[in-house]
Every structure is written in structure tokens, then in C-alpha cells.
Image: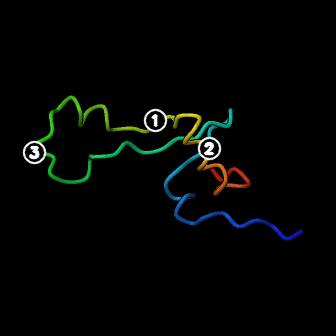
Amino acid sequence: MPKMKTKSSTKRRFRVTGTGKILGNVAYKRHCLGSKPQKMKRKARGTFVLADSDARIVRKFLPYGVS
């Protein structure tokens, strides 16, 4: 059976941790930041761990756990 291909957009947007969890970027931090509260922008700085239901979907596009 041939190798499965990784979705290019998925490997740019998500990372797999050492324990197998999926990390993603926080949304709503790109533009119109003047109207958003400082607390929201501060919490959106880093990455976050996806919920299990969402991680299951993303894992289909990352068959070999690209990090």
C-alpha cells in the first residue's frame, strides 16, 4: 500500500506534542485588534491543545504525526 499524504495546510497550522496531543493557534488575533479587549489578546498569544473531538479530525490529515 502506498504512503499516505499529509495535508500541507494542516502541517503548517498544527503541531503534535510528544504525548500525541494536537496544538493549534488561537483565533481572532490577526486584525481589528483595537476593538478587542487586552485580556483576549493576551490569552491568544500562544497555542492551545485541541479538544479530543477536533483532534480526531486533524489527526486524519496528519497520518505520520508531523511535528
Viewer-nearest residue: 16 or 1: 1
Q: Is residue 50 left or right of residue 33?
A: right
Who's the residue at 54% across and 42% down the image? 54
How far is the residue under mark 1 from the one under mark 3? 23 Å
Does dot 3 land on a helix, a strand or a loop? helix
Comes first in the chain, label 2 or label 3 = 2
Q: Which mark is residue 17?
A: none
Q: Is residue 1 left or right of residue 24?
A: right
Q: Which residue is mark 2?
A: 16
Amino acid type of the residue tagged 1 in the rendering: Phe
Q: Which mark is residue 34?
A: 3
Amino acid type of the residue tagged 2 in the rendering: Val
Viewer-nearest residue: 39 or 60: 60
Q: Is residue 31 above or below residue 22?
A: below
Label 2 Cα neighbours within 10 Å, binned few <14 / some 14-19 / many ≥20: some
Who's the residue at 65% across and 49% down the image? 59
Residue 66 position in % (x across, y down) = 66, 53
Residue 29 position in % (x across, y down) = 26, 47
Who's the residue at 85% across and 71% down the image? 2
Q: Is residue 48 above or below residue 30?
A: above
Does dot 1 land on a helix, a strand or a loop? strand
**Decide: marks 1, 2 in contact (CB < 8 A)?**
no
Label 3 Cα neighbours within 10 Å, binned few <14 / some 14-19 / many ≥20: few
Q: Which mark is residue 48?
A: 1
Comes first in the chain, label 1 or label 3 = 3
Hey, which quadrant is residue 19 in on the image?
top right
